[in-house]
Image (cartoon, grey):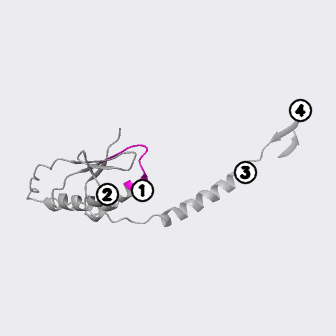
Amino acid sequence: MAFTSDSSGGAMADINVTPLVDVMLVLLIIFMVTAPIQTYPIDVTLPQPTLNPPPVRAEPPPPIRLRIDAGGQVFWNDSPQPLSVLPTLMREAVQADPTNQPTLEIDTNADADYGTLAKVLAHAKNAQMEKIGFVQN
């Protein structure tokens, strides 16, 4: 900050903005030079138009309601099942029609053990279930 006296004899306390403008112009040039370097292309595969429409899918099967209560008990469509039976039930549901799988709707109690949910999700992944949803209360 420079203190100079003006014609009235008082001190003038104005900031010298010339160095500030110089620094800003240098930063602007740096950003203009480096900005094109930071961009890179992303390959996007877009769908291509076809003359044949896709086949009409069959009516989806009813969803499977899987509920986990606070005690860790698992209910498959409202019937209690041990956790060891779930892989078999899930594989059977997928093998019934692999192209048109039912949706697995998982409803968990707020006090349910996360480990039980993790095991259910692992079983669903191993059974190759593709449609998994979570029910919110």
Q: Amino acid at mark 2?
A: Leu
Q: Amino acid at mark 4?
A: Ser
Please state which amino acid type lies under the numbered disc 3. Answer: Thr
Circle 1 residue: 115
Nearer the viewer's eye, disc 3 or disc 2? Answer: 2
Report the side of 63 relative to 134 (left or right). Answer: left
Q: Earlier in the sequence, mark 3 or mark 4?
A: 4
Query: What SS does tag 3 mark?
Result: helix
Q: Which residues are magenta?
A: 106-116
Considering the numbered disc 1 on the image, is that residue within a helix, a strand or a loop? Answer: helix
Q: Which mark is residue 8?
A: 4
Disc 3 or disc 4, which is closer to the eye? 3
Give the label, 4 or 2, closer to the camera.
Answer: 2
Are the residues flagged by discs 1 and 3 in contact, CB closer than 8 Å? no
Instruction: Between residue 104 and residue 49, name the one nearer to us.
Output: 104
Name the secondary structure under disc 4: loop
Report the Cα–Cα distance between label 2 and label 1. Answer: 12 Å
From the viewer's perspective, is the residue at label 2 or at label 1 nearer? Answer: 2
Does label 4 or label 1 sit earlier along the sequence?
4
Question: How far apart are labels 3 and 2 at the CA level?
Answer: 74 Å
Magenta residue check for 114: yes
Does residue 122 belong to the magenta stretch? no
Which residue is identified by label 3? 18
Q: Are marks 3 and 2 in contact (CB under 8 Å)?
A: no
Q: Which residue is mark 2?
A: 83
17 sits to left or right of 120: right
Q: CA distance from mark 1 to mark 3?
A: 64 Å
Residue 36 location (% of width, % of height): 48, 64
Badge 3 or badge 2: first in the primary sequence:
3
